[in-house]
Image (tube, grey):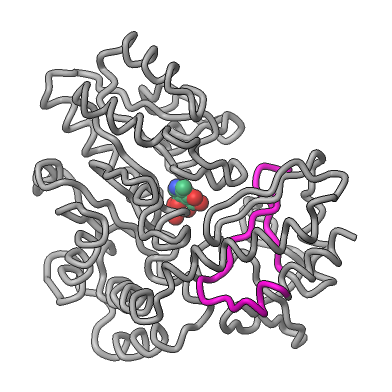
């Protein structure tokens, strides 16, 4: 079939007609279980009735105002997110990468205010932060940087989970004013910060006057059993970034910061035409209230433990399996061989599957998934891998 699209994405050979909960139907009426929820976006499942009701009402009332006018939902969402993150100021964007850009700007302002003409932000191998020029420069995937030089920087990079390397890099470069980390590296194949690593980073940042920025775009919003994954180890970031599941599919990004940092982002320094629009922020307010009313965050922790248990039973002895790892409903199965052929194979078993970093099956189902649907997902995966 001829296409007029730039050949960036290579979607699976089905055309989606509709979706509900953890299921998607193609145009021929075939049903699939969605194991990755639009890449961690459909947090409450596809077309959740409460979100659909909010969107339908809001579309009829007002879709867009621009930030030259105010509406009730942006402040309401900011207040809710500040309560849940322990931070004090919010800025809304339209995507994860844009929200990371906001965080990078805050860190640079912080550095300039402390006399650094070229403030640097320390990042980690295989961290993923987006595809704008600054965020791809901050990401630890060299292949995604080829052809875009000169990269934005400085973003000195060290191995994930290596505190000695963090200390050495910072000792060598006093211009490092902040550390940006994905507490669970999603694109790298669900690599979890080692026990004590986030806490050690927090202590180090406190002792040396550096900022700790957590990218919770994929692992946040309750997916791992805590609103922020960093909360699972009692770590409070100076800045955190959310996107993906925040509005259950309506594009949104949010950068949350402390009072002092947030107040530095003044008029003329930043802005957004669409960011914080009524449609996205009303949807996000509903997502937060459903997370609460249906107790989905603690449930994500419990369902995640059940999922890990079922996966260990089903695949523990698979000859090519390296490791099953995860927290809550963010789980990876790493194989010793590339498994990029599996998503196509999974289709014939009624499963939508995603692979991260060539070797890892990445499961990011909706938080509303039931135990029976978890069993069904594991069965489909078993058939796919047999
Ligand atoms: C951890 C993380 N940060 C940033 C991004 C970029 O978000 P977006 O694709 O919405 O720009 C992603 C997207 O996959 C992500 O997983």
Position of residue 226 in the picture relative to residue 193 (left or right): left
Q: Residue at x 47, y 29 (%)?
A: 124
Position of residue 96 in the picture relative to residue 318 (left or right): left
Magenta segment: does it hold 20? no
Magenta segment: does it hold 361? yes
Position of residue 89 in the picture relative to residue 363 (left or right): left
Which of the pair 131/80 is nearer the observer?
80
Which of the pair 199/29 is nearer the observer?
199
Position of residue 386 in the picture relative to residue 135 (left or right): right
Quarter of the image with the C terminus is bottom right
Residue 163: x and y, percent? 42, 22
Residue 6: x and y, percent? 61, 53
Quarter of the image with the N terminus is bottom right
Residue 30 figure quarter: bottom right
Residue 115 figure quarter: top left
Residue lying at the far top of the rendered structure: 172
Magenta stretch: give its range: 352-375
Residue 12 figure quarter: bottom right
Q: Residue at x 33, y 16 (%)?
A: 170
């Amino acid at each position: 079939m001829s296409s007029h699209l730039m050949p960036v994405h290579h979607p699976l050979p089905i055309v989606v007609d509709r979706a509900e909960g953890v299921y998607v139907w193609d145009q021929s009426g075939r049903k699939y279980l969605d194991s990755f929820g639009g890449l961690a976006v459909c947090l409450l499942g596809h077309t959740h009735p409460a979100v659909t009701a909010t969107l339908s009402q809001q579309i009829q009332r007002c879709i867009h105002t621009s930030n030259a006018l105010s509406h009730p939902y942006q402040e309401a969402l900011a207040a809710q997110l500040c309560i849940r993150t322990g931070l004090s100021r919010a800025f809304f964007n339209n995507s994860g990468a844009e929200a990371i850009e906001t965080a990078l700007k805050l860190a640079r302002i912080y550095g300039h205010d402390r006399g650094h003409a070229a403030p640097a932000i320390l990042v980690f191998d295989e961290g993923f932060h987006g595809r704008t020029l600054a965020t791809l420069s901050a990401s630890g995937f060299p292949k995604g940087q080829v052809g875009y030089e000169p990269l934005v920087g400085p973003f000195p990079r060290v191995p994930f989970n290596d505190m000695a390397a963090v200390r050495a890099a910072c000792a060598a470069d006093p211009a490092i004013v902040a550390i940006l980390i994905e507490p669970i590296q999603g694109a790298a194949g669900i690599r979890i910060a080692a026990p004590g690593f986030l806490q050690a980073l927090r202590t180090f940042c406190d002792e040396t006057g550096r900022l700790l920025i957590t990218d919770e775009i994929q692992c946040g919003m309750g997916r791992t059993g805590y609103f922020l994954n960093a909360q699972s180890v009692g770590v409070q970031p100076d800045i955190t970034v959310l996107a993906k599941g925040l509005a259950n599919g309506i594009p949104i990004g949010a950068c949350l910061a402390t009072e002092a940092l947030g107040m530095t982002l003044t008029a003329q320094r930043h802005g957004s035409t669409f960011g914080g629009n009524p449609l996205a922020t009303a949807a996000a307010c509903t997502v937060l209230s459903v997370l609460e009313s249906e107790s989905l965050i603690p449930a994500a922790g419990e369902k995640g433990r059940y999922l890990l248990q079922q996966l260990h039973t089903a695949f523990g002895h698979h000859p090519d399996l390296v490791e099953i790892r995860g927290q809550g409903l963010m789980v990876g199965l790493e194989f010793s061989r590339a498994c990029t052929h599996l998503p196509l194979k999974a289709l014939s078993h009624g499963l939508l599957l995603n692979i991260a970093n060539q070797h890892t099956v990445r499961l990011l189902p909706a938080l509303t998934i039931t135990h029976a649907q978890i069993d069904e997902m594991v069965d489909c995966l078993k058939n796919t891998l047999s």
